[in-house]
Image (cartoon, rainbow, N blue to C red):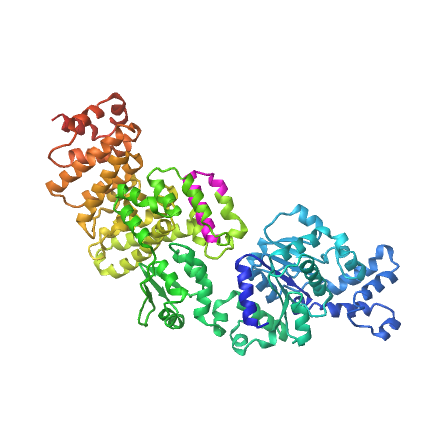
């Protein structure tokens, strides 16, 4: 088989966590251990001279030679036989680079017919992922998602070693659990054989298993298997192996550019070892493999699965392919590698390719690299008209319109926005499940998250789901898993950028650092807005989630910090306003205002901010939903940060006070949380107070007085209402 196609097939299997690497003696030979044939010859040297004079070295008698030695051994319990096997196969040699690279590939399981411990000695941290199994008892006593199966035993216990003919003939009877486990992998795993020759008995035994079950169950579409070697097979052998679902990869076809650029360690001196290392390296190293591939085709293959998302997380996009050192600042992806940048330019000229669509869905509008002309990416629509209308309603706090527009929306949108409106999610969840493509893992995980959030399922259940090995290894699901597991890495990066902003703005002349400040904030903004669009466009109802509040708080602090810098401040659009008002706790927002002392909020459209406030107040009046009191309080805080005319202050009062009153009458338990906003609206400016009598009657009730008497503003509010 073409080695390029084999690498791509193996990469796909690895991405699905369906790759098993079989390791033969040809790999250990790179550490100085004998190959299987060499071992048989060394055993033969222990037999009488008349046997060796016949020199019957061919595959038919290979297994009988150890059997002859065992039978002619008259020592108690055959200790001499086992001592001979140990002397031949035991070694103190370190693991070789191929052993290390096997773990870097991270197959689902590793199976070896070697009995040495070279693989266990590998220094890769990934060795910790694999539980070692050398006999049936290990499978019963060790539970793991990944195994290193020493199919033929361990030389540390010579009696477990499978070498002689009777060991092979009785293998399935003596090792029923191990053999059953390996055969179970035939169902849906790709096998990659390395270190085996075509006449290797171990290889042919496993191939017979594959062929037997394929014929018995008439399976036609199971995954392909691969044998990597340096000997070119005849066309007859290729056909024979193809009938057994095995493709031979001839390492002699590796081009010089791969051999020249692969970082082959000097310790690999044999031609086979060097070529095998270069081949395996192509599986893990996109940069190396790209020297013989079309970049456009590779990006299509890697990025197409991500198009299931309504919004793609920038982290998932960058993890799908090795673009080299890079960072996202606002809506620009800055690459540090000029060569990669130049190779990407023609890719984005083809609007039919997956890359432009994927980058558009990730919110990236420009590619930039120092010394290069920026690439403006095609403006591809990422939302349908229906989605645009729903998002417009949501951003404008027009919840009455949202309720009407939601009637004909998709089930996913009905789950998401219906959650905001207090709708029963059962019918939408069921419809969303029916619309799923069973083969689309991303769509299934998104549905599971929606159902979890609106049905209030156990957080532990979801954590177990996202901890499952098959989920962790699915491409394009890293950010999705992060939402419910650990956001520590992202949060640390955001906290660091917030601290850098604070340090810059404390400088004597912060305007001198405006460019640097905007760059630092650009990273914060990209993460925060990327998160916001991810949960909105994928219809994940996170609005009341403490996870979302914890994730976005550093970006909100950065926005307020930047608002205090005259040379670096940027205007806030609807998304910025939404992030602050719906994902900050009012008390925390008040503390952050005191900490950063912004010189006002730079609304992109001041009139729009008032309209959003009016719409929210009207929605609160219509739905009486106490969850909307926090956003209302935060909007008052933002708008009041700018100088207000008497008319604007009165507008806040006339819309805000009736809305808050309508909720507190039904939900007095929310009074303490919203009282600072009430006090600001009542006492902040002179003028008419709507519902003045009703407010006085409510706030002087015994229950409210107990709840609110601790606030220093309470007495002033009562006096104002009485005046």
From this viewpoint, is residue 644 visible?
yes
* Position of residue 370 measured from the top left corner of the image (x, y, whole percent): 33, 70
Residue 244 found in image quarter: bottom right
Relative to 588, residue 259 above or below:
below
Residue 422 found in image quarter: top left
Quadrant location of the N terminus?
bottom right
Q: Which residues are magenta?
A: 441-461
Q: Residue at coordinates 58% horizontally, 69% vertically from top-left?
A: 277
Q: Is residue 449 magenta?
A: yes
* Position of residue 469 measured from the top left corner of the image (x, y, whole percent): 54, 51
* Position of residue 577 measured from the top left corner of the image (x, y, whole percent): 26, 48
Relative to 478, residue 689 above or below:
above
Seen from the viewer's position, the closer of residues 676 and 438 is: 438
Quadrant location of the C terminus?
top left
* Position of residue 20 measured from the top left corner of the image (x, y, whole percent): 61, 59
Majority secondary structure in the magenta region: helix
Residue closest to the far bottom: 256
For residue 63, side relative to residue 405 (left or right):
right
């Amino acid at each position: 088989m073409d080695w390029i196609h084999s690498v791509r097939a193996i990469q796909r299997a690895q991405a699905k966590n369906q790759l098993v690497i079989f390791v033969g003696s040809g790999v250990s030979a790179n550490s100085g251990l004998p190959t299987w044939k060499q071992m048989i010859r060394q055993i033969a040297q222990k037999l009488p001279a008349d046997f060796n004079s016949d020199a019957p070295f061919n595959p038919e008698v290979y297994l009988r030679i150890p059997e002859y030695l065992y039978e002619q051994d008259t020592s108690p319990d055959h200790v001499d036989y086992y001592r001979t096997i140990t002397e031949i196969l035991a070694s103190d040699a370190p693991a070789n680079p191929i052993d290390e690279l096997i773990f870097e590939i991270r197959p689902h399981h590793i199976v070896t017919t070697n009995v040495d411990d070279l693989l266990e000695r590998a220094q890769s941290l990934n060795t910790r992922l694999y539980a070692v199994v050398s006999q049936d008892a290990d499978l019963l006593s060790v539970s793991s998602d990944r195994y290193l199966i020493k199919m033929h035993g361990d030389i540390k216990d010579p009696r477990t070693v499978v070498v002689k003919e009777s060991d092979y003939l009785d293998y399935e009877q003596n090792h029923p659990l191990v053999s059953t486990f390996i055969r179970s992998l035939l169902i849906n795993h790709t096998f990659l054989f390395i270190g085996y020759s075509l006449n290797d008995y171990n290889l042919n035994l496993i191939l017979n298993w594959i062929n037997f079950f394929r014929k018995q169950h008439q399976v036609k579409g199971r995954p392909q298997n691969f044998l990597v070697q340096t000997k070119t097979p005849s066309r007859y052998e290729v056909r024979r192996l193809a009938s057994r679902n095995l493709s031979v990869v001839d390492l002699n076809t590796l081009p010089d550019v791969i051999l020249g650029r692969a970082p082959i360690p000097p310790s690999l001196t044999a031609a086979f070892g060097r070529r095998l290392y270069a081949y395996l390296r192509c599986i893990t190293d996109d940069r190396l493999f790209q020297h013989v591939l079309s970049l456009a085709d590779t990006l299509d293959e890697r990025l197409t699965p991500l198009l299931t998302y309504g919004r793609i997380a920038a982290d998932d996009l960058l993890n799908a392919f090795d673009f080299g050192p890079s960072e996202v600042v606002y809506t620009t992806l800055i690459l540090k590698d000029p060569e990669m940048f130049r190779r990407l330019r023609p890719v984005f000229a083809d609007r039919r390719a997956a890359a432009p669509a994927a980058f558009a869905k990730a919110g990236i509008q420009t590619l930039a690299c120092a010394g290069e002309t920026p690439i403006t990416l095609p403006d591809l629509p990422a939302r349908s008209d229906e989605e645009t209308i729903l998002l417009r309603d949501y951003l404008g706090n027009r919840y009455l319109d949202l309720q009407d527009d939601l009637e004909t929306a998709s089930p996913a949108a009905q789950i998401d926005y219906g959650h905001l409106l207090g709708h029963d999610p059962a019918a939408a969840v069921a419809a969303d499940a029916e619309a799923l493509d069973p083969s689309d893992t991303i769509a299934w995980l998104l549905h599971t998250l929606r159902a979890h959030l609106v049905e209030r399922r156990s957080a532990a259940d979801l954590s177990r789901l996202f901890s499952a090995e098959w989920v962790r290894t699915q491409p394009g699901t890293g950010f999705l898993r992060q939402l419910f597991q650990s956001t520590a890495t992202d949060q640390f990066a955001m906290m660091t950028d917030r601290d850098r902003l604070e340090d810059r703005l404390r400088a004597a002349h912060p305007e001198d650092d405006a460019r640097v400040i905007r760059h630092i904030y650009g990273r914060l903004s990209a993460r925060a807005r990327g998160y916001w669009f991810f949960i909105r466009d994928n219809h994940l109802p996170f609005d009341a989630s403490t996870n979302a509040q914890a994730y976005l708080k550093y970006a909100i602090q950065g926005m307020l910090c930047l608002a205090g810098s005259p040379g670096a401040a940027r205007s806030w659009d609807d998304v910025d306003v939404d992030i602050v008002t719906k994902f900050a706790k009012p008390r925390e927002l008040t503390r952050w205002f005191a900490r950063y002392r912004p010189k006002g909020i730079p609304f992109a459209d001041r009139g729009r901010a008032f309209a959003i406030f009016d719409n929210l107040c009207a929605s609160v009046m219509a739905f009486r939903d106490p969850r909307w009191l926090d956003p209302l309080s935060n909007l008052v805080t933002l708008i009041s940060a700018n100088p207000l005319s008497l008319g604007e202050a009165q507008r806040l009062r006339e819309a805000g006070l009736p809305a808050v009153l309508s909720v507190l009458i039904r939900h007095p338990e929310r009074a303490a949380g919203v009282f600072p906003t009430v006090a600001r609206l009542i006492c902040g400016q002179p003028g008419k107070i709507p519902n003045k009598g009703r407010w006085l009657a409510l706030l002087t009730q015994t229950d409210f007085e107990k709840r609110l008497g601790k606030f220093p503003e309470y007495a002033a509010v009562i006096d104002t209402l009485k005046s």
